[in-house]
Image (cartoon, coloured by chain):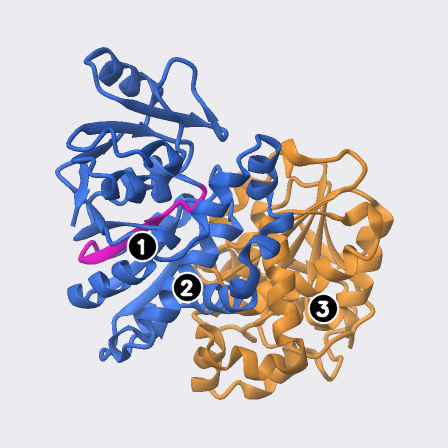
Chain colours: A blue, B orange
Amino acid sequence: MGEESSGFSNTVEVCFSPALFPVYFQDKNCVVVVIDVFRATTAICAAIDSGVEAVIPVATIEEAIDYKQKGFIVGAERSAEVVEGFDFGNSPLFFKDGKHAGKTIVLTTTNGTKAIDMAKDAYKVVIGSFSNLDVVSEYIEREDKNVILLCAGWKDRFNLEDTLFAGALAEKLAQNLRFTDLADSTQAAIKLYNAAKDDMYGFLGESSHRKRLSRLNLEEDIIYCLKLNKSTSVPVLSNGKIVKG
Amino acid sequence: MGEESSGFSNTVEVCFSPALFPVYFQDKNCVVVVIDVFRATTAICAAIDSGVEAVIPVATIEEAIDYKQKGFIVGAERSAEVVEGFDFGNSPLFFKDGKHAGKTIVLTTTNGTKAIDMAKDAYKVVIGSFSNLDVVSEYIEREDKNVILLCAGWKDRFNLEDTLFAGALAEKLAQNLRFTDLADSTQAAIKLYNAAKDDMYGFLGESSHRKRLSRLNLEEDIIYCLKLNKSTSVPVLSNGKIVKG
């Protein structure tokens, strides 16, 4: 909120698109939570929970191919589908059997990994999803900095599911008096989360990305991505790798 | 919605910031509604209603000074205040006595005139505010094109009041089957408008711009800007001037 700040509370700003991030990211001394509910950030939480040592986010398919040739497990998703020749796309269910525990894997996705890259100069970059809502909130409270909730969106457009998670997290943070300086975008996200929370699946029924995933028969993924607090991991970016924070 | 379009309905997309406009403005053959509720677009509606012949929107103070030196009535607002040396800022109340009827006036504002300039290559650029909600909706239905509702926001950030108007207009349009292809941003704006409509003044109580205007003792302007359907004008951009459409 900049000019509006009371000085007694950290600001909590929701940024609805990576294309808006430079507008909000005026001071690097902040915590940025990257949000790509369907499905990159949910998958990263699942990976770290399953014992994966680190996830290397890369922006391009070319970089992903390089890692694949070096023998890494590599996930690559574009427009909600697995890119041919890679091990997985961005489904969190890929990690359910824990067989990649201890490994470092690589991931490139349409929206999520780009958002992570944009935020990399922040004091901390945290991976958020409904699966780690409570632990991310507790982590941010301990850091006690201004917060930007960066929605990965869909190809730089606003999307509903990332907004709902931003609203859920902002509402939780705002229960702490040190996180009550809420931007208009944050107030809107909280209102939307409260309208949706009793039936998020239904609320998202007409949303563009839920329809896109449904056409690809990814209902099981959708249901997984909307479950709260399955995870106790707070994945954070550290020297270009996402690791347990 | 591009790839999601059914082909039977026009798309209705809300763009929450001028900085996102290039993402949404992929096809120029569309109607763009520019929205700056507090206060530029409300003031333009009031000006045209009062008989003003045309409003020339300009982006910079320098251009505004040029017009002032040529003898035009010139409004200039920055950060919610009248710029020194100009006739008015962007208060709609400036036009209440009708004394500028028949004249061409000039206006530059923090957010609104910039948004108008960005949209100028669209098939039609329409000025929207709560004061002309119904007539703008009817105008768009007659045009029967894809629609972008461009919120001027605040210095490229999301703001609540422009979003509420976008939601009000989108909900009205969506009653027509030819305007039912709603982006996620549009669905969000409609939900927010419905949460707010019974008490918009209260809903906006914590919003950044309502607080900013209140500090400047502009409560009367706020109340004016939230009144529905005081106007029968649909101001449109034509050869660089805003005139009655």
Q: Nearer the viewer, mark 3 or mark 2?
A: 2
Q: Residue furthest right?
A: B142
Say if labels 3 and 2 share a chain.
no
Task: Tell me residue A9's x, y (percent).
Answer: 25, 76
Task: Tell me residue B201's x, y (percent).
Answer: 58, 82
Q: What is the distance, in whole Å, between disc 2 and disc 1 at their CAs?
A: 11 Å
Residue A228 occupies which quadrant of the picture? Answer: bottom left
User: Callout 3, which amino acid?
Assistant: Cys
- Range of the magenta residues? A28-38
Q: Disc 1 on helix, strand or loop?
A: helix
Graded by Cα atoms within 10 Å as few (under 14), some (14 to 19) or many (20 or more), the crowding at tag 3 reads: many
Q: Looking at the image, which residue is at 43% across and 63% down?
A: A167
Q: Disc 2 on helix, strand or loop?
A: helix
User: Callout 2, which amino acid?
Assistant: Ala
Q: Residue furthest front?
A: A97
Q: Disc 3 on helix, strand or loop?
A: helix
Graded by Cα atoms within 10 Å as few (under 14), some (14 to 19) or many (20 or more), the crowding at tag 1 reads: many
Q: Chain of mark 3?
A: B
Q: Looking at the image, which residue is at 47% across and 40% down?
A: A221
Residue A130 occupies which quadrant of the picture? Answer: bottom left
Whether residue B52 is visible here, answered yes or no, is no
Task: Tell me residue B166's x, y (percent).
Answer: 65, 61
Task: Tell me residue B57's x, y (percent).
Answer: 60, 57
Graded by Cα atoms within 10 Å as few (under 14), some (14 to 19) or many (20 or more), the crowding at tag 2 reads: many
Q: Which mark is residue B45?
A: 3
Say if labels 3 and 1 share a chain.
no
Q: Chain of mark 2?
A: A
User: Callout 1, which amino acid?
Assistant: Asn
Q: Which mark is residue A132?
A: 1
Q: What is the distance, in whole Å, between disc 3 and disc 1 at their CAs?
A: 48 Å
Q: Nearer the viewer, residue B116 or A132?
A: A132
The image quadrant where one finds the N terminus of chain B is: top right
